[in-house]
Image: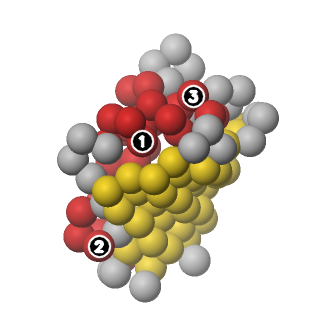
């Protein structure tokens, strides 16, 4: 199992978490509240997000490194869409 984590500075973490989860709930299995969200992504990957007062913590787990790289891009692009006023958000991915 491959995994990665990013601590993304933003004062709007909860807003972006909820917008992204609502957006993906139309096509994917999603569970969320204002502070925590989980999204079952394609190819068996899982994205977990935790909103704090000054940052959004994003974790992605995938079955292989290729899927992980793809999902990093998918999550970052979607979050940047909702954060268009401050995009691009600074994703500093740390692979495990």
The image quarter in which residue 77 lies:
top left
In this view, which residue lies farthest toward the right?
53
SS for dot 3:
helix
**Residue at (40, 47) in percent of width and height:** 75
Q: Is residue 2 above or below residue 33?
A: below
Note whether residue 87 is visible: no
Location of mark 2 (residue): 44
The quadrant of the rendering that contains the C terminus is bottom right
Closer mark to the observer between disc 1 and disc 2: 1
SS for dot 2:
helix
In this view, which residue lies farthest toward the top?
85
Q: Distance between the residues labelled 1 and 3?
A: 10 Å
The image quarter in which residue 42 lies:
bottom left
SS for dot 1:
helix
Mark with earlier residue (1, 2): 1
**Residue at (78, 35) in percent of width and height:** 53
Q: How far apart are marks 2 and 3 (CA)?
A: 26 Å
Of residues 83 and 15, the one drawn nearer to the viewer in this rendering: 15
Proximity of marks 1 and 3: CB atoms separated by less than 8 Å: no
Location of mark 3 (residue): 15
The quadrant of the rendering that contains the N terminus is bottom left
Location of mark 1 (residue): 21
């Amino acid at each position: 199992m491959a995994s990665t984590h990013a601590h993304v500075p933003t004062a709007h973490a909860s807003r972006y978490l909820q917008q992204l989860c609502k957006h993906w709930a139309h096509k994917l299995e999603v569970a969320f509240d204002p502070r925590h969200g989980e999204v079952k992504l394609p190819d068996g990957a899982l994205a977990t997000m935790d909103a704090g007062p000054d940052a959004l913590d994003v974790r992605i787990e995938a079955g292989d490194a290729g899927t992980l790289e793809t999902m990093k891009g998918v999550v970052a692009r979607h979050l940047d869409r909702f954060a268009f006023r401050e995009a691009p958000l600074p994703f500093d991915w740390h692979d495990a």
